[in-house]
Amino acid sequence: DALQNTRALLERRVREDRRLGFDDLLTGVHRALAAGKGLARRIRERYPWALIDEYQDTDRVQAEIFRRIYRDARLADDTGALIIVGDPKQSIYRFRSADIFAYLNTSDAVADDAKLSLARNFRSVPALTEAVNAVFDHPCPFALSGIVYDPVESAIKKSKLAIDGETVAGAGSAPLQIRYFPWVPKQLLTKRKMGDLAARLAADEIAALLKLADQGRAKLGKQPVRGSDIAVLVRKAEQGRRVARALHERHIASIEIGIENVIASREAEQLERLLWAIAKPQSPPR
């Protein structure tokens, strides 16, 4: 009761102050659509075709809104349709209320002959796609049975990276490698220490490749491999800093891209000051 009363009080104050947040917009549209078919019809008349990308990051309210608006439109109907694009394996916004089951339920409601899958990979070399296909070759490769893995093929004919004149796969260097360290004592298996070890291993691989390039043995196409040809993908800023430190220890220059907080940047601070001056020109400088 206390929670319901608090929610009702909050909604009343929001209406009185004439303020709306993003969640308020969603719940308002959801309620209006539930009240009758008129709004859904008018929205569909104005936007007969809808293409929604990253559908795996929707929540139940959003999914229900789309369903109510476009449930009368069929894919075979050339007057309009709802087209969704998504990959449940990429659902990463649960902390923002994204609901993977909203995606799965929508997918189950779509006829099999109305589903299309991307079967070609334009980013990875054939040996890497084959290795990934082998890793996920299992009847239930993920925690939920509704999430499947469709094998893909590479649109790239062969790797441009060659060592001693042979492509990487042909030179015995597998593009997908899993490191196993049975010699590491259990007391060393802390998250931080393993993170440092991973950074050092990545730096060692890069150093070895650049050494081969200096010897004229590692080439990307017709040119020797350069440091700017190599990227290390990380999930967190601290991981990137560890790799940068490990590279620095090996006298390899590097730059870090996209790992800092935009709000904490100097540009954001200057923009905030400008907006403050526009909004309150009589106020003292911040």
Image (tube, rainbow, N blue to C red):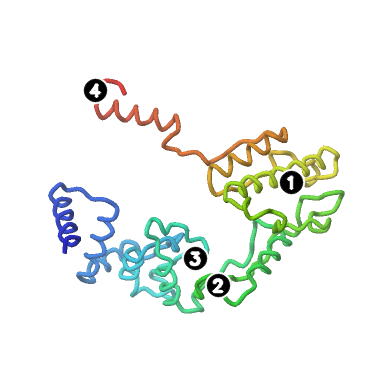
Q: Mark 1 and mark 2 in contact? Answer it, CB < 8 Å.
A: no
Query: Disc 1 designates what residue?
Result: 205
Q: CA distance from mark 4 to mark 1?
A: 56 Å
Chain-order first, disc 1 or disc 2: 2
Query: Disc 2 designates what residue?
Result: 148
Q: Residues within 10 Å of mark 1 (few under 14, many from 20)?
A: few
Identify the residue at image location x=45%, y=38%.
Answer: 262
Q: Where residue 282 appears, x then y in whole percent?
A: 22, 21
**Dot in front, 4 or 1:** 1
Residue 183 numbered tag? none
- Amino acid at dot 2: Val
- Amino acid at dot 3: Pro
Residue 88 numbered tag? 3
- Amino acid at dot 1: Glu
Identify the residue at image location x=23%, y=70%.
Answer: 34
Q: Where residue 257 appears, x then y in whole percent?
A: 56, 39
Q: Mark 4 and mark 3 in contact? Answer it, CB < 8 Å.
A: no
Q: CA distance from mark 4 to mark 3?
A: 49 Å
Chain-order first, disc 3 or disc 2: 3
Numbered disc 1: secondary structure: helix
**In-image side of 273 versus 144 (left or right):** left
Chain-order first, disc 1 or disc 3: 3
Q: Residues within 10 Å of mark 4 (few under 14, many from 20)?
A: few
Identify the residue at image location x=31%, y=23%.
Answer: 286
Could one spot residue 157 in this view of the protein?
yes
Query: Disc 4 designates what residue?
Result: 283
Q: Residues within 10 Å of mark 2 (few under 14, many from 20)?
A: some
**Dot in front, 1 or 3:** 1
